[in-house]
Amino acid sequence: MQVSAEVLRELHRIHRQLSDLRDRLQRGPRQVRIGHQAVEHTEQELAAAKEAAKRTRMEADDKQLSLRQREAKIADLQRKLNESQSNVEFKAFKDQIAADEAANAVLEDEILDRLEKLDELQQHVLDAEHKLSRVREELQRAEERVAREQTTLHDELARVKDELVHAEVALPPEFKSEYERIVKARGDEGLAPVDGESCGGCNTTLTTQIMNQLYLSKPIFCRCCGCMLYLPEGRLVPGKKH
């Protein structure tokens, strides 16, 4: 039984083309899924930024309310101080006013800190909104591009599959089952050209006997990796002239 190296070369070319087309068909939807994940992640970032800004705003508002309440208390203490009838009362009101004013000074610093933090967080919200807009646009472009590519790739895949069917007709019937077994299991990696005196799949050095069988167009499988071997184009039997 003989198997033409030319036939195996053509079959390997077609299988590699099929492998590439299938990979591209999977790559597009994979890129779209990544785009959806990016949008979801950015939406979560935006929600977190908004929540942080809301929480900081509430903290600032609570402290401002406490400040106003303390200021009202100080005003009342000041009135009582002015109406005090004894030195003891006067000193007590004076000390309480001083304590409340010190507390207010701390509150004012805390309020200023919260407002500065709020400015930063609001900028984070704006940045997240811009990022979300950008990744959504990128996703839309990816979806449109992949939709266009999928149609073309499916048409090309059907054409190459048809080309494979016609190319497989040249295989000897008694070799067909072995060929189908290996390409079903390994696809384009089931075939390999001879590279010098080695297997092009695993670089294992081939024996003289195997090389002689290849020159005689015998079906040969690499004993190491199991690849179906074939001679590359232009490889002649040693000593044979053009």
Image (spheres, rainbow, N blue to C red):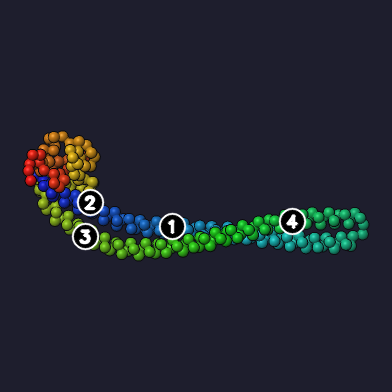
Q: Position of residue 241 (x, y in %)?
A: 7, 43
Residue to which mark 4 is pinned: 105
Earlier in the chain: of badge 2 and badge 3, it is 2
Rendered view: 46 above or below 10? below
Frontmost of labels 1 and 4 is: 4
Residue labelled with disc 1: 38
Which label's residue is closer to the chain start, 2 or 4?
Answer: 2
Task: Give the numbered dot on residue 175.
Answer: none
What is the three-letter code of the residue carrying label 1? Ala
Q: Amino acid at mark 4?
A: Ala
* Rendering quarter of residue 205: top left
Whether residue 50 is visible = no
Q: Secondary structure at mark 3?
A: helix
- Find disc 3 in the rendering and name its residue: 158
Q: Are marks 2 and 3 in contact (CB under 8 Å)?
A: no
SS at mark 4 in the image: helix
- The reply to whether discs 1 and 4 touch (Cβ–Cβ < 8 Å) is no
> Residue at 34% across / 63% down in the picture?
145
Label 4 and label 3: CA atoms lie apart by 78 Å
* Numbered mark located on residue 16 in the image: 2
- When the figure is inspected, residue 93 is found, relative to residue 210, above or below; the finding is below
35 displayed left or right of 86: left
Disc 2 or disc 3, which is closer to the eye?
2
Instruction: Report whether residue 108 is seen.
Output: yes
| Mark 1 vs mark 3, CA separation in Å | 33 Å
Say which residue appears at 13% left-offset and 44% top-offset: 235
Q: Disc 2 versus disc 4: distance between alpha carbons?
A: 76 Å
Which residue occupies 61% across, 57% down? 117
